[in-house]
Image (cartoon, rainbow, N blue to C red):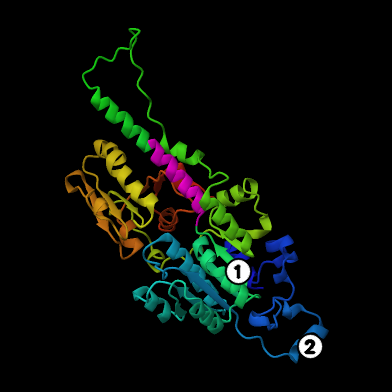
Amino acid sequence: CPMRAAACLLHGRAPLAVSIRQSLGAARRNPLAAGWPCVRGRRRAWTSASSSSSSSSSSTASAHASPAPPRSVMFVSFLWLEASSSAAGVRTGSLLRAFQRWGWRVHFVACARPNEHESILAASGVATHHVPPNRGAEFEAALAAANPDAVIFDRFMAEEAFSFRVRAACPGAARILDMQDLHSLRYARQDAVKAGVDASTARRKAAERTRGVPTVGADGGAVTHAIEPNLVEAAMAAVPVAGDDKLARELASVHRCDLTMVCSPTEVRLMRDVFEVPARKMVPASFFCELPEDARTAAPGFEPRHGFATIGTFHHPPNVDSARWLAAEVWPLIRRELPTATMRVYGAYPTPAIESLHAPRDGFLVEGFAPTVGGAMDGARVLLAPLRFGAGIKGKIVDAWMRGLPAVTTPVGAEGMVPGM
């Protein structure tokens, strides 16, 4: 079954190693369980995962059947895969390569114009299709070329834009949503941090206006100053509520799909227990870790290393906020204790605002894009990940773990990082 591949990714086994009953349970009641009709009304013969142990009568019957063609999977995204720029790109790239190892034909559809990232995909054996936005006929032509058994949507926005066309043209293709993270949760946490920052800014401006004014109340008592809130705690307590537009769109996408790949075990529990998404609709699928070639050799020892590092694309708002907070509040405290320490900040697409944080005299170095993760991490003694909001699983923590680099982070950064998961 096409969905069995997604259902067992967490366990790191071959795609047919986990029973479909275990992964989908009650989902057998949906139409996809009834023989898996192929695209455009035809039906495809499916081979059994346990054909070697099937009965002799089944073996005799299958001996006269035509060999089943290779299965096909189509990834649908607005952008071309950038495995060198973000953790999401690394994760999707690993999943894509897993399908290739399993013998599936892999197709990738993107709305963005072909670029160097499209060329890298094509060179790896992936069939690429450029479909400009709102070009239904061109997307359907890509579907016809791929003849997919499964379609994986990169985030709910891609599912919104394309799943209805998949359902109409390929009713037998499994529709799988890859959430990457629970967007509505991330935005709720971002709003909580922004509200706290705005309140702190207002209090600071008010204090500046009253500077020099006696701090005595009308009753003769001392004025009580507000205690600054812990914004990380505020973010962790934030949950999207009914009426939240992003939550409604995200859950609608989940319910339209046959299976949803959820990155964080925390988000699996939230969706199941709070948003009442049936467990059969979800599969935990965090990172499909492949130990990098440059991490297979012994990592540098303690002495050759020095300083701190952090990494993360600046297209991602949590990383932008993290770098600003790191420069303004966290790094000065560290520098006070370690006057000669250095902090190297890596990440693709740094904005002028991020580049303005570069302060060599303070040991704070904005390095920008890192061609390799090893180049960014292997010279550091500690990875810092001061994230005040976010969701999903943090790729920088996974990378640090794979390279034996100690990581210091917040509860936001540590969320979902469960051994064995």
Q: Is residue 173 left or right of residue 414?
A: right
Q: Residue at x 68, y 81 (%)?
A: 41
Q: Position of residue 338 (x, y in %)?
A: 25, 39
144 or 265: nearer the viewer:
144
Q: Position of residue 109 (x, y in %)?
A: 47, 75
Look at the image and tell me whether residue 13 can be seen: no
The residue carrying mark 2 is 61
Badge 2 amino acid: Ala
The residue carrying mark 1 is 175
Q: In which quarter of the view is residue 102 placed?
A: bottom right
**Quarter of the rendering occupied by the C terminus:** bottom right
Look at the image and tell me whether residue 182 can be seen: yes
Question: Are there few (<14), some (14-19), or many (20+) residues within 10 Å of tag 1?
Answer: many
- Magenta extent: 181-196
Q: Nearer the viewer, mark 1 or mark 2?
A: 1
23 or 184: nearer the viewer:
184
For label 1, the SS is strand
Question: Are there few (<14), some (14-19), or many (20+) residues within 10 Å of tag 2?
Answer: few
Q: Residue at x 25, y 36 (%)?
A: 336
Residue most toward the left? 361
Q: Is residue 336 left or right of residue 110?
A: left
Query: Where residue 70 is drawn, which disc sits there?
Result: none
On whether residue 185 falls in the magenta region, the answer is yes
Q: In which quarter of the view is residue 86 placed?
A: bottom left
**Quarter of the rendering occupied by the N terminus:** bottom right
| Mark toward the start of the polypeptide (1 vs 2) | 2
Q: Residue at x 62, y 64 (%)?
A: 257
405 or 330: nearer the viewer:
330
Q: Residue at x 78, y 79 (%)?
A: 54
Badge 1 amino acid: Arg
For label 2, the SS is helix
Q: Is residue 388 above or below residue 226?
A: below
